[in-house]
Image: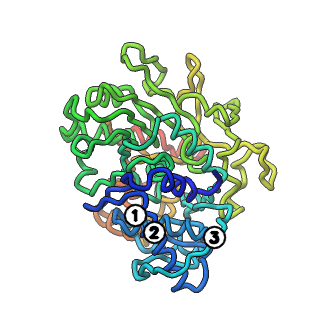
């Protein structure tokens, strides 16, 4: 099994009449989903004249998105999802970097024309993460990177016909690969919630009979704060999997109260290591949960088919079949691999930038070594946000920090220059950055405080958030 599309195609052969997807009131079997996506692929060939090598896919929660993803893979193209809700300026940057031959915009209709066998390129998709230089970084992931990840997770979570899998992640966010292709590789049903259902996850789980739930931990905290965590509701739930943020024991306990019969697994991994590279499943009895120094659930050991080392400063470095081969722009590779010698080879470790410590035989995530943070699971380079804020004519300098508000992490900005109101800066930024990258609050300062090394005193500013 080498190509991403082949995982889906194999399930079509084995389970043609099993439901593959429920989306927007529509249920399609594996056979029907393939027929419709093949027709779209044939329509693309007819309209384009040849198989496009690079396709940008506007990511929505409509049937056309999922058909488009499969059609692009069927044609052997490299897929780059973009979110139409993100600012046009940012999507224009991604389009310029992705250099697509085709943007699927809904105007191409299906065709019953011939559809020749297409040979997939090495790269399956390119996702863009926040970059410290002020522009996003493209991360190409190959079919070979994906094969061990998909196989491992199908086996780990016992995914097969009869399983009903959540689809909570935006397709621009790499955990969506689990949503789609672990589901379709195992012959399960992808259950796509609408926007209203996303706001009430427990109701979605219960009413739609979800068996496998994949989410960021902050969903638990936010739902609890809104009073949307009734206990013992989703009886169908077998597995709850969390990714993207430090997962606290308080969050785990709250979720265990919701679904006490479901196994709770914490997974970790950057986009560069193909969604996730570690996992830890909590014991069924909360009384057996191991304590950790920072009150977070361990991230596990590294998958046994990957290799890892931890540097003196605690940085986790990983190599193996899931490690990507380098950024879309090779200039971004500098300093990200060990040894720090380019070009990148299979022997190089990827430097995650995350600090870990071994406690009672399990890795515990201690935080970042740099200015990268996670907000609702999304990786954000604070430098990219700061670079955008500095483009405002009224801002002289700015520092953005991440503050833990209890329910979730939020961004707060401190700036010098004109005393602009928060609302004005937020409106300005929302035209340039995705909403998860826009600070919720700004504070005007006469000067940015400096530490003893003459750098912005981020620790002092973080402390000031709660004062």
Vertical position of residue 348 compared to residue 414: above or below: above
Mark 3–mark 2 Cα distance, whole angstroms, equals 14 Å
- Dot 3 falls on a residue whose secondary structure is loop
Q: Nearer the viewer, residue 255 or 384?
A: 255
Residue assigned mark 1: 32
Decide which of tag 3 and tag 2 comes sooner along the chain.
2
In the picture provided, is 466 more to the left or to the right than 224? right
User: Residue 425: x percent and y percent?
Assistant: 35, 64
Mark 3–mark 1 Cα distance, whole angstroms, equals 20 Å
Count neighbours of disc 2 (C-alpha within 10 A) and say few if under 14, some if 14 to 19, many if 20 or more: many
Answer yes or no: is residue 378 visible.
no
Vertical position of residue 260 compared to residue 442: above or below: above
- Dot 2 falls on a residue whose secondary structure is helix
Count neighbours of disc 3 (C-alpha within 10 A) and say few if under 14, some if 14 to 19, many if 20 or more: few
* Quadrant location, the C terminus: top left
Look at 46% across and 67% down and name the residue there: 82
Mark 2–mark 1 Cα distance, whole angstroms, equals 9 Å
Look at 31% across and 37% down and name the residue there: 220
Residue assigned mark 3: 118
Front: mark 2 or 1: 1
* CB atoms of marks 3 and 1 within 8 Å: no
Q: Quadrant of residue 100?
A: bottom right
Count neighbours of disc 1 (C-alpha within 10 A) and say few if under 14, some if 14 to 19, many if 20 or more: some
Q: Which mark is residue 37?
A: 2
User: Residue 34: x percent and y percent?
Assistant: 46, 64
- Name the residue furthest top: 287
Q: Nearer the viewer, residue 455 or 242?
A: 242
Decide which of tag 2 and tag 1 comes sooner along the chain.
1
Q: Which mark is residue 270?
A: none
User: Residue 359: x percent and y percent?
Assistant: 56, 19
């Amino acid at each position: 099994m080498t190509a991403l599309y082949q995982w889906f195609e194999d399930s079509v052969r084995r389970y043609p009449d099993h439901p593959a997807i429920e989306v927007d009131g529509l249920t399609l079997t594996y056979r029907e989903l393939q027929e419709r996506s093949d027709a779209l692929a044939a329509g693309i060939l007819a309209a384009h004249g040849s198989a496009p090598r690079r396709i940008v896919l506007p990511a929505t929660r409509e049937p056309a998105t999922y058909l488009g993803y499969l059609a692009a893979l069927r044609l052997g193209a490299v897929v780059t999802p973009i979110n139409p809700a993100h600012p046009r300026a940012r999507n224009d940057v991604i389009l310029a970097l992705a250099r697509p031959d085709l943007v699927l915009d809904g105007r191409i209709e299906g065709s019953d024309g011939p559809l020749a066998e297409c040979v997939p390129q090495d790269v399956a998709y390119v996702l863009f993460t926040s970059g410290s230089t002020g522009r996003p970084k493209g991360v190409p992931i190959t079919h070979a990177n994906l094969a061990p990840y998909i196989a491992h997770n199908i086996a780990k979570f016992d995914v097969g016909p009869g399983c009903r899998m959540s689809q909570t992640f935006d397709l621009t966010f790499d955990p969506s690969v689990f949503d789609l292709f672990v589901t379709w590789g195992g012959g399960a049903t992808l259950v796509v919630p609408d926007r209203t259902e996303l706001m009430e996850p427990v109701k979605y789980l219960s009413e739609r009979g979800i068996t496998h739930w994949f989410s960021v931990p902050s969903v638990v905290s936010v739902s609890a704060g809104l009073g949307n965590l009734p206990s013992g509701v989703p009886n169908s739930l077998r597995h709850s999997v969390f990714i993207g943020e430090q997962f606290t024991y308080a969050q785990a306990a709250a979720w265990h109260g919701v679904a006490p019969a479901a196994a709770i697994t914490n997974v970790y991994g950057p986009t560069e290591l193909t969604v996730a590279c570690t996992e830890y499943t909590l014991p069924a009895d909360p009384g057996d949960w191991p304590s950790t120094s920072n009150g977070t659930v361990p991230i596990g050991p590294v998958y046994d088919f990957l290799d890892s080392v931890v540097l003196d400063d605690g940085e986790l470095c990983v190599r193996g079949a899931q490690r990507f081969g380098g950024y879309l722009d090779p200039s971004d590779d500098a300093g990200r691999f060990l040894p720090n010698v380019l070009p990148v080879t299979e022997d190089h470790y990827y430097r995650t930038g995350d600090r870990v410590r071994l406690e009672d035989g399990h890795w515990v995530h201690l935080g970042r070594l740099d200015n990268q943070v996670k907000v609702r699971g999304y990786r954000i380079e604070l430098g990219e946000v700061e670079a955008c804020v500095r483009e405002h004519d009224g801002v002289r300098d700015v520092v953005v920090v991440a503050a833990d508000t209890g329910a979730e992490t939020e961004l707060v900005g401190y700036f010098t220059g004109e005393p602009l109101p928060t609302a004005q800066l937020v409106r300005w930024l929302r035209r340039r950055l995705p909403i998860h990258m826009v600070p919720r609050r700004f504070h005007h300062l006469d000067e940015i405080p400096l530490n003893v090394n003459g750098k912005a005193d981020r620790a002092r500013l973080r402390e000031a958030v709660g004062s």
